[in-house]
């Protein structure tokens, strides 16, 4: 189990406990065994690459919810996301039958929100696996392996296309060439570049 999944499980147990304590009648949707089964089957989350492709290709209409604070949201957010507090979200802030994807910085807060919405019988709700941290690493700033094989190179090319679409900056191994290869942003991400660069620098400072 990865650290992200471990944190999600801890968040799940805490949220279930809080919900049961506050509810005089136990909701079947909050049954720990049912929620655990959803997590085990990986139906509780969407991976960054899948979300990025869905947004880029408009394959699925998604209600994307950002649970961070307004300062973090203003600095950078995934295109199309709505800023909401947890209280707003669980008090019917989104339509019940929409495809809902929730994210926070790392994922724990979003996992708690997922439990609360499932407890209210929202059918189509998922979290962004790894939160915005994973989005930054996998979509905005993907790294080319130092010695990639053919599948690794193909995977990186796919990530590079997504990165440029969202205004990111693919990271290349500079040891071989002495300098990174220049990249031209594609339409759709150009306005995001200044905010993305600031977010990247902030994340590096906190590492």
Image: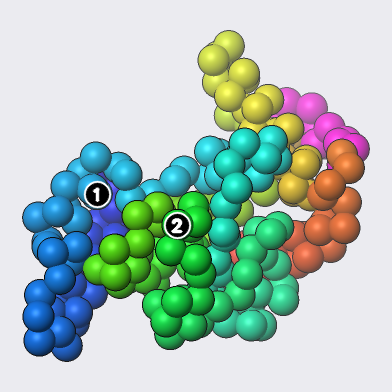
**Percent x, y for residue 119?**
25, 68
Q: Which residue occupies 29% across, 63% down? A: 121
Label 1 neighbourhood size at 10 Å, few (<14), some (14-19), many (20+)? some
* Picture quadrant of residue 114: bottom left
* Picture quadrant of residue 126: bottom left
**Percent x, y for residue 54?**
61, 40
**Percent x, y for residue 155?**
58, 24
| Disc 1, SS | helix
Q: Is residue 176 magenta?
A: yes
Residue 97: mark? 2
- Tally the numbered discs: 2
Q: Which residue occupies 87% across, 39% down? A: 186
Label 2 neighbourhood size at 10 Å, few (<14), some (14-19), many (20+)? few
Q: Is residue 65 left or right of residue 144?
A: left
Q: Is residue 9 left or right of residue 175?
A: left
Residue 39: mark? 1
Residue 86 shows up from this direction: no
Q: Which residue occupies 34% across, 68% down? A: 117
Part of the protein shown in magenta: 175-185
Q: Nearer the viewer, residue 115 or 173?
A: 115
């Amino acid at each position: 189990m990865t650290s992200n999944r471990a944190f999600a499980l801890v968040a799940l147990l805490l949220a279930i406990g809080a919900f049961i304590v506050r509810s005089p009648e136990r909701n079947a949707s909050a049954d720990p065994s049912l929620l655990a089964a959803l997590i085990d089957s990986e139906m509780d989350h969407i991976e960054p690459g899948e979300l990025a492709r869905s947004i880029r290709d408009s394959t699925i209409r998604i209600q994307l919810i950002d649970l961070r604070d307004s300062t973090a949201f203003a600095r950078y957010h995934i295109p199309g996301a709505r800023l909401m507090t947890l209280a707003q979200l669980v008090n019917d802030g989104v339509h019940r039958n929409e495809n809902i994807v929730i994210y926070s910085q790392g994922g724990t807060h979003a996992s708690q929100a997922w439990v609360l919405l499932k407890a209210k019988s929202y059918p189509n709700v998922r979290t962004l696996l790894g939160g915005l941290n994973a989005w930054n690493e996998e979509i905005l700033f993907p790294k080319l392996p130092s010695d990639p094989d053919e599948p690794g190179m193909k995977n990186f090319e796919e990530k590079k296309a997504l990165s440029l679409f969202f205004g990111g900056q693919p990271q290349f191994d500079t040891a071989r060439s002495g300098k990174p290869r220049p990249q031209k942003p594609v339409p759709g991400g150009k306005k995001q570049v200044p905010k993305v660069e600031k977010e990247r620098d902030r994340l590096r400072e906190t590492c």
